[in-house]
């Protein structure tokens, strides 16, 4: 928006201020929907600081390969979320995707834009691929006891582990959410102690408490314990759950204070130039270049194996 406001003619300004799709892949995550919802609110509030920009020039277009929005929440809440976001001006293209790294859709349409935000959900650390263990969609295949088959003494939990969801049964695995990761961490610690003491390991079992999707402001949809609130009640559920997930009273107080200040004074806008204008990659964020290759892992572990 800052660059668009500095353009001399309306036509280039329109191109620079046009917003591209927040590309969201169908999965147990819904980061793309929340990202589009929050950034739409952010740009709508910030446009008042740029007198040369027309609010109508800013477009948000959410592209999803799934036929419905937020399928995890069910058809009713998905339609409610779409209606809420459409009322705020967000456009949708469902059942399609983005062709390569351009903003050309697989259904043939092309969206003019200088900004592409891709949210593809949670992925495991690249370190997982260096272990040579069996994986499920990039995550370590783990047992219900959080052990990794074929690797004695190796445990896995959280985003890096595909742990069977015993509460659902069948071939279901636990989604990579904080709800499961926090509880798996505790179960993993208890199983490590049990292994050291020679006691049997306990399987991880947790029934999903539900899902919450924060759409910004008083807008939200959620599905706690089978209920389907939306709007302010759903926002109360979402914020309440996030507060309970924080470990200390100090952290909760800071978050509540920040929410209160934002509600009363509005959002604060800060421009950051990330990575000297070059595109960032997952390897940059994960510092993956510091990981050992599978060959290096075997070389370093060979002396340990000889001593054993």
Image: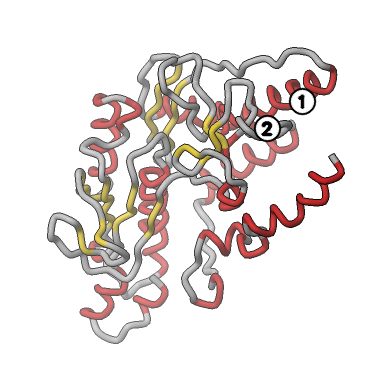
Q: Residues within 10 Å of mark 2 (few under 14, many from 20)?
A: some
Quick one: SS at disc 2?
loop
Relative to the observer, which residue lies in front, 234 or 100? 100
Point 73% across, 32% down: residue: 153
44 or 274, which is in the foreground?
274
Residue at image x 51%, y 35%?
176
- Residues packed near mark 1 inside 10 Å, few (<14), some (14 to 19) or many (20 plus): some
Q: Quadrant of the N terminus?
A: bottom left
Where, by quadrant of the figure, is residue 178 drawn?
A: top right
Under circle 1, the secondary element is helix
Above-or-below relation of 11 to 301: below
Residue 5 lies left or right of residue 210; in this view the side is left
- Residue 152 lies left or right of residue 3; in this view the side is right
Residue 109 numbered tag? none
- Give the CA separation, mark 1 to mark 2: 8 Å
- Mark before the other along the chain sequence, 1 or 2: 2
Mark count: 2
Give x and y (percent) for residue 273: 53, 73
Residue, x 24% and y 66% (percent of image)? Answer: 57
On the picture, is 61 further left or further right than 291?
A: left
Instruction: State if disc 2 and disc 1 touch (CB < 8 Å).
Output: yes
Looking at the image, the residue that sits furthest to the bottom is: 8
Label 1 belongs to which residue? Answer: 192
Residue 188 image offset from top left, x and y in percent? 70, 26
Task: Answer with left or right where residue 60 lies relative to residue 223.
Answer: left
Q: Tell me the tag on residue 155.
A: 2
């Amino acid at each position: 928006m800052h660059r668009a406001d500095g353009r001399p003619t309306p036509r280039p300004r329109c191109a620079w201020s046009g917003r591209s799709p927040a590309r969201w892949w169908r999965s147990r995550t819904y980061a793309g929907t929340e990202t589009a919802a929050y950034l739409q609110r952010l740009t709508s509030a910030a446009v008042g600081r740029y007198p040369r920009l027309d609010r109508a020039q800013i477009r948000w277009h959410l592209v999803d390969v799934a036929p419905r929005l937020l399928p995890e929440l069910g058809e009713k809440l998905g339609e409610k979320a779409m209606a809420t976001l459409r009322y705020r001006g967000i456009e949708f293209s469902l059942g399609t995707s983005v062709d390569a790294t351009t903003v050309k859709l697989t259904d043939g349409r092309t969206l003019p834009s200088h900004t592409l935000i891709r949210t593809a959900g949670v992925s495991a650390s690249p370190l997982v691929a260096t272990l040579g263990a069996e994986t499920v969609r990039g995550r370590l295949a783990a047992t219900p006891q959080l052990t990794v088959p074929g690797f004695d003494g190796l445990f896995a939990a959280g985003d890096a582990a595909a742990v069977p969801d015993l509460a659902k049964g069948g071939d279901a695995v636990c989604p990579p959410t904080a709800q499961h990761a926090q509880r798996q961490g505790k179960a993993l610690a208890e199983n490590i102690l049990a292994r050291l003491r020679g006691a049997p390991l306990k399987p991880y079992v947790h029934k999903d408490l539900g899902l919450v999707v924060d759409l910004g402001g008083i807008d939200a949809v959620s599905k706690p314990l089978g209920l389907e609130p939306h709007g302010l009640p759903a926002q109360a559920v979402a914020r309440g759950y996030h507060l309970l997930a924080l470990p200390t009273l100090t952290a909760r107080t800071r978050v509540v204070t920040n929410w209160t200040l934002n509600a009363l004074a509005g959002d604060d806008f800060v421009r950051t130039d990330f990575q000297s204008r070059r595109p960032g990659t997952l390897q940059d964020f994960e510092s993956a270049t510091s990981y050992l290759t599978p060959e290096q892992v075997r070389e370093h572990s060979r002396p340990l194996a000889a001593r054993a």
